[in-house]
Image: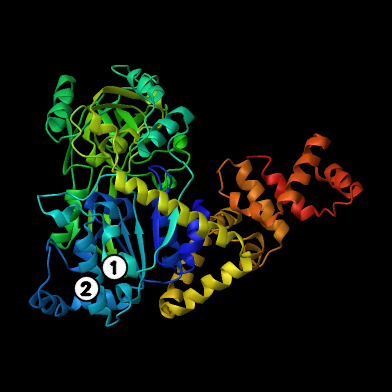
């Protein structure tokens, strides 16, 4: 299933489990849906099973959001105490959509407890109190932490609430991290518990081999021990003065502390010229990790090459790009208000990091020691951080590193089948039918009209400072059809296409792939063949070829098809 298809299904209001391999774009889809809901004044709770995962989405842990905390059970007294807290009551009252990311690390019985809390606060016996519930994660990645309790070893899909919630499975099939087909096959074999001799030989070929890019790799270890020691040892070896950058904070002390623990940037960051660093947040112009060659993402590596006149570090990435880095913020928001916020440079020393903290990152070069892997899936998590086989230096691995849970393997196969069925059903619907269902869901959850007006006024004010083609780019991000964009902007469809052409000319890499669905498969093929035969991008000769063959062309559709010649 593509990202666009998954986003369509989310907008239809279904309860969804969003899954797929590492790098398939789960966080991108969630962020896109959150932006869509916020733009329509819908209150959405963005949570995750861990603090680190929560910072990727700008939310909080599900334990904190729900009021469950660290409890493993709930008594009547606990519920009575929770119900007396006005801020919790208001939180549940206004929330229409609940997102829980990295659900693979959430114990099944805790998911049941959270679901029960939702029903109590919402006074509704429907699953999760009638809210749309979206779970996201990959069960091949790190499982729930176990402490000898048999219950704690169960995955979330074993929860009673999972079965009751009737989840639509969206299994993403696109790959946006690895572009190396050979390495993709290695990861797929590990994921399928079917590692071949050829794959073992390829992994062996990377033993003690430096990354082909020549970049100094980030070191990944399975245990916390020595990570900080290694980083500071390397820093001490560099001559020169140190510069300290202290994290600032505001808001609820408890939430601030939670943000600090989950933030990959340290409270006190010590840098020197020549220090090896890693970005811990996506750049503003590239918040979803696209086109990383021209910006930076969470995991991009670099070196401190200078300090500018403001005292901020200047980072030269291994791609050769240079960025002056200012403090970034991590925050917890609720109903448009900031409850807690921390600010620090989006950097950390990057000679070493743990496998656990690497989840969600895309690394350019990696040195990894998997010889002490102690849980199934750990090797897959580590190996899937890097973009290519040549970007990895492997120090060693044990048998556990190349294993995944066989139960998860069977469950994933079932989910892929269910996702394919869902995708087939979606393809049978017209765009008009899909939009009608999405609009009906939006009416059902009754967005706050006053808030919608404020959002609209804010958009208008913001758009006054934007170029006309940039405004169209925003509508493309919302996956609007050409007709919908034209109607929204009170323009002709031809003008909208001219905006897309301008965006391509400016090399802003607009995502318009979904627009191909507006052309029939046979029609699109005929047009491409006509362009090839005409050996030009000028429309008139192509029109004449199609007209001569009685293909009933239109200049509008020809312009739309021509967009894909640029891709």
Residues packed near mark 1 inside 10 Å, few (<14), some (14 to 19) or many (20 plus): many
Q: Nearer the viewer, residue 108 or 86?
A: 108
- Looking at the image, is 446 positioned above or below residue 248? below
- Looking at the image, is 384 positioned above or below residue 510? above
Residue 417 at x, y = what percent? Answer: 47, 53
Residue 312 at x, y = what percent? Answer: 28, 37
Tag of residue 322: none
Dot 1: element: helix
Looking at the image, do the residues carrying marks 2 and 1 touch, with CB atoms under 8 Å apart?
no
Dot 2: element: helix
Residue 457 at x, y = what percent? Answer: 47, 71
Q: Quadrant of residue 24?
A: top left
- Left or right: residue 518 compared with residue 190: right
Badge 2 or badge 1: first in the primary sequence: 2
Alpha carbons under labels 2 and 1: distance apart: 12 Å
Any part of residue 441 in sight: yes
Q: Residue at x 63, y 65 (%)?
A: 430
Q: Nearer the viewer, residue 389 or 513?
A: 389
Residue 391 at x, y = what percent? Answer: 37, 25
Q: Which residue is mark 1?
A: 161
Q: Which residue is mark 2?
A: 117
- Left or right: residue 527 compared with residue 382: right
Residues packed near mark 2 inside 10 Å, few (<14), some (14 to 19) or many (20 plus): many
- Left or right: residue 422 compared with residue 447: right
Quarter of the figure with the C terminus: top right
Any part of residue 241 in sight: no
Q: Nearer the viewer, residue 459 or 257?
A: 257
């Amino acid at each position: 299933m593509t990202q666009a298809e998954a986003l369509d299904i989310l907008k239809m209001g279904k309860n969804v489990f969003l899954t797929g391999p590492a790098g398939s774009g789960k966080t991108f889809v969630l962020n896109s849906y959150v932006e869509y809901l916020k733009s329509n004044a819908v209150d959405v709770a963005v949570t995750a099973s861990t603090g680190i995962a929560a910072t990727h989405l700008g939310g909080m842990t599900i334990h904190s959001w729900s009021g469950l905390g660290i409890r493993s059970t709930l008594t009547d007294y606990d519920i009575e105490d929770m119900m007396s807290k006005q801020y919790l009551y208001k939180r549940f009252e206004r929330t229409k959509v609940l997102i829980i990311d990295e659900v693979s690390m959430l114990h099944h019985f805790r998911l049941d407890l959270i679901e029960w809390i939702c029903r109590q606060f919402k006074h509704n016996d429907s699953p999760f109190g009638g809210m749309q519930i979206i779970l996201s994660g990959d069960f091949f990645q790190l499982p729930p932490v176990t402490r000898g309790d048999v219950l704690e070893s169960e995955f979330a899909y074993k929860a009673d609430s999972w079965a009751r919630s009737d989840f639509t499975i969206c299994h993403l099939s696109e790959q946006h991290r690895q572009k190396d087909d050979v390495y993709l096959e290695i990861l797929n074999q590990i994921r399928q518990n079917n590692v071949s001799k050829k794959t073992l030989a390829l992994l062996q070929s990377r033993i003690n081999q430096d990354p082909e890019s020549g970049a100094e790799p980030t070191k990944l270890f399975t245990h916390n021990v020595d990570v900080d020691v290694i980083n500071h040892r390397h820093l001490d070896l560099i001559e020169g003065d140190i510069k300290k950058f202290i994290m600032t904070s505001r808001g609820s002390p408890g939430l601030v502390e939670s943000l600090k623990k989950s933030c990959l940037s340290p409270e006190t960051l010590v840098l020197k010229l020549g220090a090896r660093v890693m970005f811990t947040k996506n750049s503003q112009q590239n918040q979803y990790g696209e086109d990383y060659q021209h910006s930076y993402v969470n995991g991009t590596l670099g070196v401190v090459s200078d300090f500018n006149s403001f005292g901020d570090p200047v980072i030269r990435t291994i791609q050769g790009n240079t960025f002056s880095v200012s403090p970034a913020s991590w925050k917890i928001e609720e109903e448009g208000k900031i409850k807690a916020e921390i600010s620090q440079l989006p950097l950390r020393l990057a000679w070493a990091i743990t496998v656990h903290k690497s989840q969600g990152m895309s690394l350019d070069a990696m040195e990894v020691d998997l010889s002490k892997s102690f849980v199934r899936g750990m090797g897959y998590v580590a190996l899937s951080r890097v973009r290519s086989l040549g970007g990895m230096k492997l120090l060693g691995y044990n048998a556990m590193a190349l294993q995944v849970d066989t139960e998860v393997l069977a469950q994933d196969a079932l989910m892929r089948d269910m996702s394919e069925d869902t995708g087939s059903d979606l393809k049978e619907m017209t765009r008009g039918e899909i939009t009608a269902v999405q609009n009906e869901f939006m009416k059902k959850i009754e967005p706050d009209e006053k808030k919608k007006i404020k959002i609209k006024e804010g958009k208008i004010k913001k758009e006054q400072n934007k170029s006309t083609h940039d405004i169209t780019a925003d509508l493309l991000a919302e996956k609007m059809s050409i007709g919908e964009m034209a109607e929204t902007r009170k323009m002709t469809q031809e003008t909208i296409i001219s905006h897309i052409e301008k965006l391509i000319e400016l090399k802003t890499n607009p995502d318009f792939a979904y627009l191909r669905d507006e052309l029939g498969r046979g029609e699109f093929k005929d047009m491409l063949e006509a362009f090839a035969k005409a050996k030009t991008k000028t429309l008139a000769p192509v029109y004449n070829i199609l007209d001569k063959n009685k293909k009933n062309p239109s200049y509008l559709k020809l312009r739309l098809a021509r967009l894909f010649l640029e891709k």
